[in-house]
Amino acid sequence: MLSHARPWIRHTRSLWPGLALPLLIMLGATFLSEHYGGPQLLYALLFGLAFHFLHEDARCRPGIEFCAKTLLRIGVALLGARITLAQIGQLGIGPLATAALGMVSTIALGAWLARRLGLKTDFGLLCGAAVSICGASAALAVSAVMPKSKETERHTLLTVVGVTGLSTLAMLVYPLLVKFLRLSDTGAGIFLGGTIHDVAQVVGAGLMISHEAGDVAVIVKLFRVMLLVPVVAVLAWYWRQRSSSASASASRQAPLLPFFLIAFMVLVLLNSLGAIRPGFTESLGQVSRVCLVVAISALGIKTSFEDLVKLGWRPMALMLAETLWLAAAFVLYLCVFAR
């Protein structure tokens, strides 16, 4: 019995050198975010980039890869514990349809505009999903089913940097736009929840208006998070079909619906049925956040800052255009169709 356990024990021990560093980065990023403000994920990413040299160490590499892949999928799956179908149903068809159409059109715009800017279509799809769904979390989820390459990792990190920065800027600017447009608290919540990329910034922007706006914003945002499942499933199918001609065996190994998305949907259903206690739901949400911060730290360690700089201004222009497009879609709905 012990002999069968020894390989697993050796494998676990091999992870610790590379696992310890992302964990320490997560603690440092959390401390800075809680005491001095600012986005936790962005701190974790920047700290990770500073330790890129450790990815070349053979002792650290297995643990870093474990954080960047396995913990990433666990973190995305646990996001489902925050959502119930009842919360979504309270919104009505208008905001939900606008969010869905905004998501589809933003991803399509990203793919089209990426080609016009001389970037790869895959990068446009990745940015479009991140902007239109849930920021860094969506970028990490989509990257988990993308064809693996060094370029993919650079694109993922750049997308996380871009959407986190734009989300923080939107948190400051959009409440002013809401007041300028004279939206009601409900309308303000729909706009903020439908347009800001990351959940934390949605909460911050909503509470700048009122508690009612904050509550509505979170519900709209959680619906956008639910859209992660069909989007990742469709993109996984697209990349699987594209690569099937190159390797039939690789195609069989790539599941159409990744396991972490199945776990995500199961948690949504369980939470909707009341099978998960509120206290436990909060705990799962915290575990999800920890996993995602550790994963982004590991992705930062794997990525060279020099490689990111070489990508130039076009990726940021792409994400800015997608952000403005999504905001315009919700302004059109609130100012024309919802009145």
Image (cartoon, helix red, strand yellow):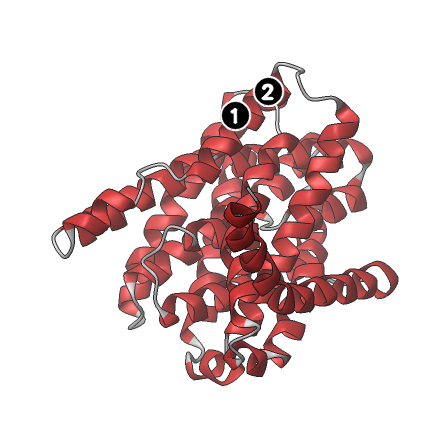
Which residue is at the front of the view, 335 or 158? 158
| Residue type at tag 1 | Val
Judge left or right: residue 150 versus residue 338.
left
How many other residues sit within 10 Å of disc 2, few (<14), some (14-19) or many (≥20)?
some
Residue 253 placement: quadrant: top left
What mark, if any, has residue 210 been given in the picture? none
Q: Position of residue 120 (x, y in %)?
A: 29, 66
Residue drawn at the location 43% of the way across and 52% of the way down: 144
Q: Residues within 10 Å of mark 1 (few under 14, many from 20)?
A: some
Q: Position of residue 286 (x, y in %)?
A: 73, 43
Judged from the image, the secondary structure of the residue bearing numbered disc 2 is: helix
Which residue is located at x 24 percent, y 47 percent? Answer: 240
Using the image as rendered, state which of residue 327 and residue 214 is in the foreground. Answer: 214
Residue 90 seen in the current view: no
Please state the total of marks drawn on the protein image: 2
Say which quadrant the C terminus sits in: top right
- Looking at the figure, which quarter contains the N terminus? top right
State the residue at coordinates (62%, 50%). Answer: 198
Disc 2 residue type (three-letter): Leu
Marks 1 and 2 in Cβ contact (< 8 Å) = yes
Which residue is the extreme one toward the left? 245
Q: CA distance from mark 1 to mark 2?
A: 6 Å
Task: Choose between 318 and 74: the one closer to the eye.
Answer: 74
Q: Secondary structure at mark 1?
A: helix
Query: Which residue does the numbered mark 2 point to in the structure image?
Result: 270
Left or right: 311 as drawn, with respect to 133: left
According to the picture, the residue beneath numbered tag 1 turns out to be: 266
Q: Position of residue 307 (x, y in %)?
A: 45, 81
Q: Who's the residue at 52% across and 33% down the image?
A: 264
Q: Is residue 309 left or right of residue 2?
A: left
